[in-house]
Amino acid sequence: MQLKKYFAAMSAALVLTGASVANAALTPIDVTWNPSGAGISTAGSFTFNNVVLNTYQTIDITGGTTFSEQGYLRMSVFTNNGLPSSIPTSGFPSGTPYSLYIAFNGSGTQSAGTPSTGTFNSLTYSLLGAPGVTTFVDANNDGIFEVVGAAPVTLATGSLASPGSTSLTVDPGTGLLLPAAQVIATFLPND
């Protein structure tokens, strides 16, 4: 079975805030981002407390119950208390365009069938920023995406702090698969 996994916005909040326990993510925390401080744009700083992610990865569960996944989570829209704050690749609020994304590798186990549950056994990631617009292309149509754009700057790294959970259910209204994952990860800024 081949399916796409989407990481919940909660995962991004955990990663960005550096939370090491799940209850730290219950209340959004304001974060101020300054891309010019990272040297990837001339855009000014802005404050946000939620990020919408676009996902670029495929997960394969073939024959068994183990999975191995690598991919990219593009940080595409930032909001503060539900209102849009900035869209980096458009260069808002002002300045040159830039991209922010997470590159990750993870593995774990998942039960067969639907509904399904599972556990991440390992997960590592890097928060990356790059000048200009970064795109992700599956050039070989093999489920592995390649990055197209300027060389990135590593802004932070992290790893799985405790076993994360996965689930796969079916939406009764549409019949579509609803994959989800939640992880608690460390956040180590690159000074």
Image: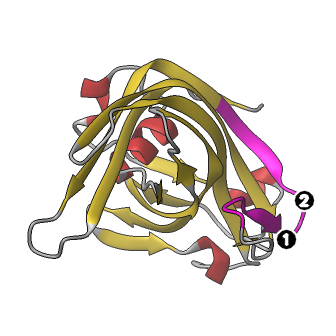
Q: Residue at x 28, y 59 (%)?
A: 178
Q: Residues within 10 Å of mark 2 (few under 14, many from 20)?
A: few
Instruction: Give yes or no for residue 154 being in the magenta stretch.
Output: yes
In space, the residues marked 1 and 2 are separated at their CA atoms by: 7 Å
Which x, y percent locates residue 170?
Answer: 20, 59
Number of labelled discs?
A: 2
Q: Quadrant of residue 43?
A: bottom right
Q: Residues within 10 Å of mark 1 (few under 14, many from 20)?
A: some
Which x, y percent locates residue 106?
Answer: 59, 34
Which x, y percent locates residue 135?
Answer: 73, 74
Which x, y percent locates residue 130?
Answer: 79, 62
Q: Residue at x 72, y 64 (%)?
A: 142
Query: In this image, 58 relative to 129: left or right?
Result: left
Q: Quadrant of residue 57?
A: bottom right
Give above or below for 32 relative to 120.
below
Residue 149, disc: 1
Q: Could you say which is closer to the camera, residue 151 or residue 69?
A: 69
Residue 96, disc: none
Give above or below for 105 relative to 184.
below
Q: Residue at x 70, y 66 (%)?
A: 99
Of the residues shown, which amino acid type is indicated by label 1?
Answer: Gly
Give above or below for 10 relative to 21.
below
Instruction: Give yes or no for residue 144 being in the magenta stretch.
Output: yes
Quarter in which the C terminus is drawn: top right
Q: Residue at x 50, y 44 (%)?
A: 61
Which residues make up the magenta segment? 142-157
Q: Secondary structure at mark 1?
A: loop
Q: Which residue is mark 2?
A: 151
Give above or below for 130 relative to 156.
below
Of the residues shown, which amino acid type is indicated by label 2?
Answer: Ala
